[in-house]
Amino acid sequence: MLDDLRRLYATTKNEDLADILGVSMRTVIRKARELGLQKDPVWQHGNTMRHLKMMQLENMVHGIKSPFQK
């Protein structure tokens, strides 16, 4: 289980890891901290951008305009 955690942690969502390993998300996070594991910054940025684009599309569908001016 620890080998899988080390191999997958950097590029896998914690929720998905918890399902794969059969433990809680809290356990995944706690064990990763104990082992000194960190998410890959490039993967994390891509994941953040996907979420941002989804929210922009959802706002557009609902007619919500951004409070921030470009």
Image (cartoon, rainbow, N blue to C red):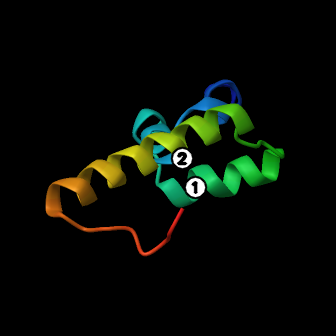
Q: Does 63 sit above or below residue 2?
A: below
Residue 70, quarter of picture:
bottom right
Q: Position of residue 3 (x, y in %)?
A: 69, 25
The secondary structure type at the circle numbered 2 is: helix
Count up the numbered dots: 2
Within-10-Å neighbours for mark 2: few <14, some 14–19, many 20+: few
For disc 2, the marked residue is 48
| Residue 11 shows in this picture | yes
Q: Position of residue 36 (x, y in %)?
A: 83, 46
Name the amino acid type tagged 1: Thr
Q: List the single residue furthest toward the left.
A: 62
Q: Position of residue 7 (x, y in %)?
A: 67, 24
Most foreground residue, 31 or 60: 60
For disc 1, the marked residue is 27
> Mark 1 or mark 2, which is nearer the start of the sequence?
1
Label 2 vs label 1: CA separation? Answer: 23 Å
Most foreground residue, 64 or 4: 64
Name the amino acid type tagged 2: Thr
Image point 25% across, 68% down: which residue? 64
Most foreground residue, 63 or 51: 63
